[in-house]
């Protein structure tokens, strides 16, 4: 089994998943930064002058243009390889300052696996995918703040929130939001989550679901509720509504009638 995530709206990232991990014994390099993890087994990552083992609960990051290959120590399954365009990350003030780095932190590993599962999930919208991707990058890369970028984080986070409260039903994207508030995308994401405890996409989704809940009390047909609360279709509303309220829109509407 194999799967690939590639989307023109996140053109700087590509993810590949393989169920059965095979050896790659020929030395090679990539133009992108490579991030690798496995769920089962153990690999040996070989560089020109060194090597290290990659085990479960670890992730390996290899810089662009660094020759490497991999052999199998223990039969390995569920392998993820994420390729990231280095020039794009530098534009977003994210910098990888090592040739290679092994993260043995279980929380970082869990964050990476969750990110990969998010990217491969076709039911998740592109804004959520990108925000999760950049949040993960902010964990493992050095953040270089633009020398002209001076941020009153509390003040700007409330400005972002006020804007979302008014415009949450519009088609929003992270690039346009960052330009509106004259900060980088990475800082947009970080200041909002630090202040309110939710990523931007989750905040928007929460607003839409509560709007849908309000419309459901008017006995509006569910398909119309979906259209008027910013969802792609009724199934998207159903998934999102149940995730927050543990009940479907239909069940909620029927309970009101009772």
Image (cartoon, helix red, strand yellow):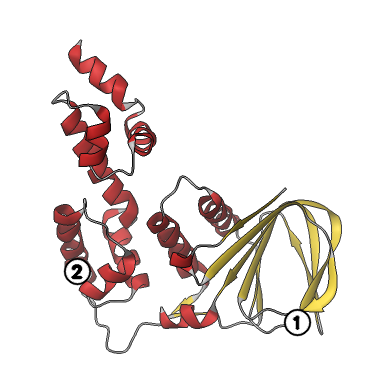
Q: Is residue 198 visible?
A: no
> Residue at 24% of width from left, 15% of height from top?
255
Query: Looking at the figure, which quarter contains the C terminus?
Result: top left
Q: Residues within 10 Å of mark 2 (few under 14, many from 20)?
A: some
Residue 130 image point, x, y percent: 43, 62
User: Which residue carries the number 2 mark?
Assistant: 156
Whether residue 180 is situated above or below residue 167 in the rendered picture: below
Question: Closer to the camera: disc 2 or disc 1?
Answer: 1
Residue 30 image point, x, y percent: 68, 78
Secondary element type, mark 2: helix
Query: Which comes before the other along the chain, label 2 or label 1?
Result: 1
CB atoms at circles 2 and 1 under 8 Å apart? Answer: no
Report whether 211 appears left or right of 125. left
Report whether 101 appears left or right of 251. right
Q: Is residue 141 visible?
A: yes
Residue 67 image label = 1
Whether residue 36 is situated above or below residue 66 in the rendered picture: above
Q: Residues within 10 Å of mark 1 (few under 14, many from 20)?
A: some
Secondary element type, mark 1: loop
The picture quadrant where one finds residue 193 is bottom left
């Amino acid at each position: 089994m194999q799967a690939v995530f590639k989307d023109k709206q996140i053109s700087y990232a590509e993810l590949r998943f393989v169920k059965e991990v095979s050896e790659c014994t020929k030395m090679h390099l990539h133009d992108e930064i490579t991030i690798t993890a496995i769920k089962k087994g153990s690999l040996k990552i070989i560089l020109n002058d060194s090597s290290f083992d990659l085990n479960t609960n670890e992730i390996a990051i290899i810089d662009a243009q660094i020759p490497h290959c991999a052999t199998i120590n223990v039969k390995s399954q569920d392998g993820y390889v994420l390729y990231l365009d280095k020039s794009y990350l530098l534009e977003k003030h994210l910098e990888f300052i090592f040739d290679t780095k092994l993260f043995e932190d279980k929380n970082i590993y869990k964050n990476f696996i969750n990110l990969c599962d998010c990217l491969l999930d076709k039911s998740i919208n592109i804004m959520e995918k990108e925000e999760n991707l950049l949040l993960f990058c902010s964990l493992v890369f050095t953040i270089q703040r633009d020398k002209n970028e001076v941020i009153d984080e509390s003040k700007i986070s409330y400005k972002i929130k006020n804007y979302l409260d008014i415009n949450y039903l519009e088609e929003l994207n992270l690039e346009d939001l960052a330009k509106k508030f004259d900060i980088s995308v990475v800082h947009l994401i970080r200041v909002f989550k630090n202040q309110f405890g939710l990523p931007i996409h989750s905040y928007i989704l929460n607003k839409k679901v509560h709007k849908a809940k309000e419309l459901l009390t008017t006995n509006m047909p569910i398909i119309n509720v979906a259209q008027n609360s910013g969802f792609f279709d009724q199934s998207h509303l159903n998934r999102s509504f149940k995730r927050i309220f543990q009940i479907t829109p239909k069940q909620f509407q029927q309970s009101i009638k009772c």
